Image: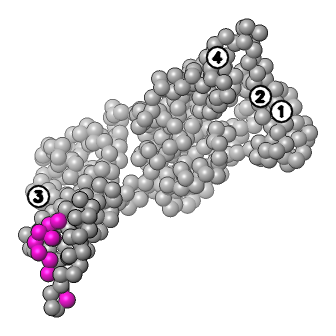
């Protein structure tokens, strides 16, 4: 088929009228369109561009069919970013009408223009805005496909400000806690295997060990004392009254992230949504309970079970294609969450690089106590090395103690690795089996 396709395009390239205009036979034109559609399986954008460039050379009937096809593609793209419609179906006709009218006027669309953009009649738009018509699901999809309206954004409150019972927790693509636990147990019993730090948050006891650690006075003093007021002030100064999405990556118990949300709400009346993404179900529940208790009706709170190493999989965290980007996103990694990353630079480049211009990133990280060439000074100044880290050891070795078979005891030791300038110290865990 490839050779036939190439031959046909060769014929077409040499079939030209005397005035220089292409004079393709109809079957060549149809085959050209077919080949373009086949290429669409690999690259839709290239195929669409090809069709747009050649459509004027098609017969009138073919042109109309291709214009209709392109229109459907454009609508499909809009609908693909329209998200879950449950927030719209939960609204009464009067509430939907008020929302639709407000959004339409805010983005400068007339009823006639909205009718054209959505493919709905003028009468339907008028009846909807007056609350006189209950929309079908197809009608809602058409309205959600008009990017400027931003109706795909979850509306967890009605136009009167009352809270509506809508989903507040989501399982993200490819998240399988059971599979992760199986992998943890397999790695714990495999010679030479490595455990990613993500696995320290999977089971309930690991979550409790983490809570014991981050609730200690030493942890609070070192990692909770952040200038959140100044951070919130700087964000509001730069984004004004734009709606905000606070995307908390690995929030743990959520204490710091919720405090930042409070500071933001104290400085703006703009809508705020708090998205909590964590791989630990117990920690996510605690963070959600804290957020709803502290924020109440002032913000929408959503939890997402998943791994922040793959932000690109989660559309709720990313700018919506085709919209006017009225919202501003704030990505946070607080409470030494960055310590879970193998490569901080590549994470910021590859994951947070998906943000839109004008978005924010709030990170906290530890400064080195001394250069890596001065290991003795690091041991003297770094508290866990100087005074011991019983809580850290209990948390970090917990999965090994629980899932390694035939292990009588574990011994931990911090060793200096002079050749590793980025990580000059390593925690070495030695497992002693019952046989020994």
The CA span between labels 4 and 1 is 23 Å
SS state under label 2:
strand
- The quarter of the picture where the C terminus appears is top right
Question: Horizontal placement of 182 versus 29: left or right?
Answer: right
Q: In the displayed orientation, state which residue is furthest to the top.
A: 435
* Display colour scheme: one colour
Identified at 21% across, 81% down, the residue is 14
Tell me residue 257's x, y (percent): 58, 40
Query: CB under 8 Å between callouts 3 and 2?
Result: no
The residue that disc 4 covers is 404
Q: Which mark is residue 159?
A: none
Residue 27 lies within the magenta run: yes
Disc 3 crowd rating (10 Å Cα; few below 14, some 14-19, many 20+) is some
Question: Horizontal placement of 150 versus 182: left or right?
Answer: left
Question: Residues in magenta?
Answer: 20-31
**Residue 112: in sight, yes or no?**
no
Look at discs 1 and 3 and give the one toward the viewer. 1
Q: Which mark is residue 428?
A: 2
Circle nearer the N terminus (2, 1): 1
Query: CB under 8 Å between callouts 1 and 3?
Result: no
Circle nearer the N terminus (4, 1): 4
Tell me residue 102's x, y (percent): 28, 55
Q: Which mark is residue 121?
A: 3
Circle nearer the N terminus (4, 3): 3
SS state under label 4:
loop
Query: CB under 8 Å between callouts 4 and 3?
Result: no
Circle nearer the N terminus (1, 3): 3
Look at discs 4 and 3 and give the one toward the viewer. 4
């Amino acid at each position: 088929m490839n050779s036939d396709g190439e031959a046909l395009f060769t014929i077409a390239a040499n079939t030209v009228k005397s005035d220089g205009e292409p004079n393709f036979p109809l079957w060549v034109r149809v085959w050209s369109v077919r080949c373009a559609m086949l290429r669409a399986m690999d690259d839709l954008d290239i195929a669409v561009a090809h069709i747009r460039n050649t459509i004027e050379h098609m017969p009138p009937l073919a042109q109309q069919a291709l214009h209709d096809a392109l229109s459907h593609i454009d609508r499909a793209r809009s609908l693909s970013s329209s998200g879950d419609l449950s927030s719209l179906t939960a609204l009464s006709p009067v509430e939907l009408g008020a929302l639709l009218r407000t959004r339409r006027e805010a983005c400068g669309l007339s009823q006639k223009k909205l009718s054209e953009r959505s493919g709905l009649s003028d009468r339907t738009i008028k009846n909807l805005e007056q609350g006189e018509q209950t929309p079908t699901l197809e009608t809602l999809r058409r309205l959600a496909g008009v990017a400027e309206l931003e109706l795909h954004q979850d509306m967890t409150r009605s136009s009167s400000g009352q809270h509506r019972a809508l989903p507040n927790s989501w399982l993200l693509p490819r998240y399988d806690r059971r599979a992760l636990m199986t992998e943890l147990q397999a790695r714990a019993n495999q010679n030479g295997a490595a455990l990613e730090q993500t696995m320290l948050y999977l089971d309930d006891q690991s979550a409790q060990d983490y809570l014991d650690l981050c609730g200690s006075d030493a942890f609070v003093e070192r990692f909770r004392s952040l200038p959140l007021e100044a951070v919130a002030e700087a964000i509001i100064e730069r984004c004004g009254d734009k709606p905000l999405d606070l995307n908390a990556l690995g929030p743990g118990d959520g204490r710091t992230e919720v405090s930042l949300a409070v500071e933001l709400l104290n400085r703006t009346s703009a809508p705020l949504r708090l998205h909590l993404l964590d791989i630990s179900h117990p920690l996510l529940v605690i963070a959600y309970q804290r957020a709803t208790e502290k924020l109440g009706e002032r913000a929408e709170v959503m939890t997402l079970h998943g791994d922040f190493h793959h932000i690109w999989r989660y559309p709720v965290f990313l700018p919506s294609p085709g919209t006017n980007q009225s919202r501003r996103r704030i990505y946070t990694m607080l409470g030494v969450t960055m310590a879970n990353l193998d490569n901080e630079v590549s994470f910021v480049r590859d994951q947070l690089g998906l943000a839109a211009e004008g978005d924010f990133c709030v990170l906290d990280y530890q400064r080195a106590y001394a250069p890596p060439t001065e290991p003795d000074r690091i041991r003297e100044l770094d508290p866990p090395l100087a005074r011991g880290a019983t809580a850290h050891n209990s948390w970090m070795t917990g999965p090994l103690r629980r899932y390694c078979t035939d292990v009588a005891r574990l011994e931990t030791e911090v060793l200096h690795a002079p050749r590793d300038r980025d990580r000059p110290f390593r925690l070495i865990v030695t497992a002693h089996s019952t046989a020994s």
